[in-house]
Image (tube, rainbow, N blue to C red):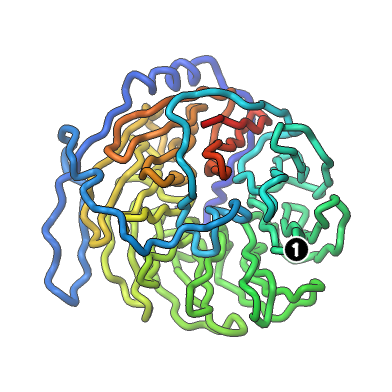
Amino acid sequence: MAGQVKRRVWSGVPLAALVVATAALVARKVVMERSRPASPSGAITTTTAGPLASVSARWAQTPFAADASVPGGPATTFHGDPQRRHRAKGIGPARVSVGFQTKVGGPVAAQVVASPDGQTLYAVTLEGLLVALTLSGEKKWSFALGDRAYGAPAIADDGTIYVGSDKKSFFAISPAGQMLYKLDVEGEADVAPLVLPPGQDALVIFAAGDTVYALRKGGDVAARFRARKKVYSAPTWLPDGRIAFGAQDDKLYILGKGLTPFAVIDLGADVDCAPAVMDDGSLVVGTDGGEVVRVGRGGEIVWRTKVSGYVRGGVTVTRSGDVVVGTFGPVPRVVRISEKGTLLGAFEIQGTGAKDFGIWGSPLEDDAGSLYFGTQDDRVLGLSASGAPIFSYSTQGDVDAPVTMLGDGSLIVGSEDGTVTRLLP
């Protein structure tokens, strides 16, 4: 699959596919994985999925860490914070109650994010629109980005919205919907940007084509770095100030100040997945080799665990330190892995047999340890901390975008039928 373009362009769904997707609700289950014992200290642990067995308490056996970092405010960026862990404050819904459903003028394939005060929602569409919504679902304004937008916007503390599009352009937009600047670049700016914490040389990091850019506040380019192939991975901020991202040259890149290389790790397959930062500062990332890999702070591989499907949309690091990912086919699953790389369990959905069908966005974790995620069979699912199903909500289109949680526990869902939905707690 290396080098292959893997973005999905929305189209109508055949009736036969809908029949297969509907069967998913019946076929869902949580299963335990058998795994190899941990390797001796200093060696890389490689874990391989074995035969599927019955439900096990291992899914939630790890207690919460008392010092686990959770964003205190709204999700203003992909996965809620610069470390991309996808944790949220609040308790999500136990049943489905729809607060609003708003058509936004095109399929939504990127996570919906919020303003710093939590009062405005921002969605981008595959028709090339950035749309601002109130918490009741009313449209405030829209801004034309010139082409499809696949990457979630990132919102700075002053409310400025940073977003790219396939027009090979990167934008800064005011909270009122006015363009502050546009930067034309050589490649499609189709991944979520990263707003850096205060005190850095640059303000925003984003990728376009095979190049990663660091921009100052006014849009001047402070630094750039070129990978060997396309970068589909959203950049991630490490606590020591370094940046990490993956590329379709099979590499995980860790860059230091001025985007100078610190480590380049060959993972053997495309790395379209955004890395996430573990609580000890190490990284975890998925690959098109059907693996989840943990990389130490020095760039060394700590363990790699096979999950039998592409991992492309991101990684969730739970409050307990476990790692949760969504995988693609032929059997799409949400897989839970311990911080040591041991497979703890998996929740399956009905697949089509295709390797490119499955679960794109990794789950959101709430304060109770419940997980919420979308699927390509047009649903949003909730799982309890024990892995038991909480609810299944049907949309009219694929839900590739990660779910966002508001302060009251509401879930915001973008789907490829062109709808943004609020599910009330």
Q: Residue at x 47, y 31 (%)?
A: 93
Which of the 4 image quarters holds residue 329?
top left
Residue type, mark 1 in image: Asp
State left or right for residue 356 relative to residue 149.
left
Which of the 4 image quarters holds residue 420?
top right
Q: Is residue 268 visible?
A: no
Q: Residue at x 71, y 45 (%)?
A: 119
Q: Position of residue 397 (x, y in %)?
A: 58, 27
* Within-10-Å neighbours for mark 1: few <14, some 14–19, many 20+: few
With respect to residue 166, does 422 lie above or below?
above
With respect to residue 116, does 282 lie above or below?
below
Q: Nearer the viewer, residue 205 or 261?
A: 205
Q: Nearer the viewer, residue 221 or 99?
A: 99
Q: Residue at x 69, y 52 (%)?
A: 117
Q: Position of residue 162 (x, y in %)?
A: 73, 59
Per the image, the residue denoted by label 1 is: 158
Q: Position of residue 381 (x, y in %)?
A: 44, 31
With respect to residue 274, does 411 lie above or below?
above
Q: Residue at x 64, y 61 (%)?
A: 193
Q: Position of residue 182 (x, y in %)?
A: 83, 63
Q: Nearer the viewer, residue 220 or 76?
A: 76
